Amino acid sequence: MGFMKPSIPAMPPIPDIKPAPEPPKFDDASRAEEQAKKRARVRAGRTGRSATILTGADGLEDDPSKVSKKTLLGG
């Protein structure tokens, strides 16, 4: 059966391995500045629950500028 098997080609040579590039420093000043900007942007985008609620515990009755009730005289 040896004459029916095709011959296996030789493997190509292994390419030279290049050293990996130097990774960026973790304690870099530009990285710290970038993180500070990102945190400031996130902090500015946050609105708390109390900032979104416009009413107090008494409702809208305490501020006449926010609520205008119609009177019996049509005003």
Image (cartoon, helix red, strand yellow):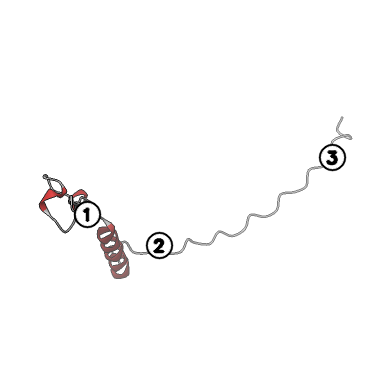
Q: Where is residue 51 in the image (x, y as percent from the top left)?
A: 20, 54
* Badge 2 density bin: few <14, some 14–19, many ≥20, Cα 10 Å: few
- Compare residues 68 and 50 and report the one nearer the observer: 68
Q: Residue 74 carries which label?
A: 1
Do residues under tags 2 and 3 come within 8 Å of each other at their CB atoms?
no
Q: SS of the residue at dot 3?
A: loop
Q: What residue type is labelled 1?
A: Gly
Q: What residue type is labelled 3?
A: Pro
Q: Where is residue 75 in the image (x, y as percent from the top left)?
A: 20, 57
For label 3, the residue is: 6
Q: Position of residue 35 (x, y in %)?
A: 30, 62
Residue at left 47%, top 61%? 20
Q: Distance between the residues labelled 1 and 3?
A: 102 Å
Residue at left 67%, top 55%? 13
Q: SS of the residue at dot 1?
A: loop
Q: Distance between the residues labelled 2 and 3?
A: 47 Å
Q: What residue type is labelled 2?
A: Pro
Instruction: State the count of labels.
Output: 3
For label 2, the residue is: 23
